Amino acid sequence: LEQGTLMARAAAQNASNVALRETRASIFASGEMAEIFFLGNANPQDLADVPRLRYRLLIQNVTEVMLEIYSQTMATGFAPETWNTQGNTLVRRILDTPGGNWFWANYRHNYPADFRTEVDKILADASSL
């Protein structure tokens, strides 16, 4: 039973890693997406409607990976350092940018309250540095 639990945790962690790698691959495999990512991080309002939509969906994909890591940590017994290292790092790297702040301000309501509270805390801590 214990080994089965460990294997399930490892599979869940791998699924999160695969999703994150696929999102990163969509950026580095396409010069257009890389440009949208950089411009969107700087100021998504400078993007035309379609590139801004693509930027939002890209950030949404990464945020959903964050939610998955957070949920697995809180609900399935992942070690807290999983969230503290991977999740916290992703929040700071992706959402603590002008574009990430824009995304979070406009779409945070799509996420569970406990996750919103956690992300808000990380972003507040990051802004105080």
Image (cartoon, helix red, strand yellow):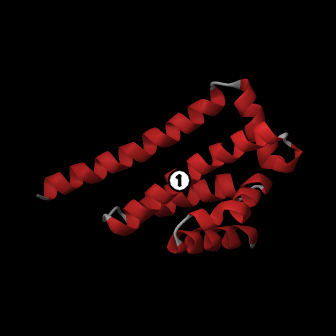
List the single residue furthest toward the left: 1
Question: Quarter of the image holding residue 98?
Answer: bottom right
Label 1 residue SS:
helix
> Which residue matches tag 1?
64
List the single residue furthest toward the right: 46
Compare residues 16 and 85 and report the one nearer the observer: 16
Classify 101 as above or below 113: above
Number of numbered markers: 1
Residue at 31% x, 65% y is: 77
* Location of residue 38 in the rendering, given as x and y in whole percent from the top left corner: 77, 40
Identified by mark 1, the residue type is Glu
* Location of residue 56 in the rendering, given as x and y in whole percent from the top left corner: 69, 47
Classify 99 as above or below 111: above
**Is residue 60 shown to the viewer in this render?**
yes
Classify 85 as above or below 21: below
Q: Is residue 39 left or right of residue 87?
A: right
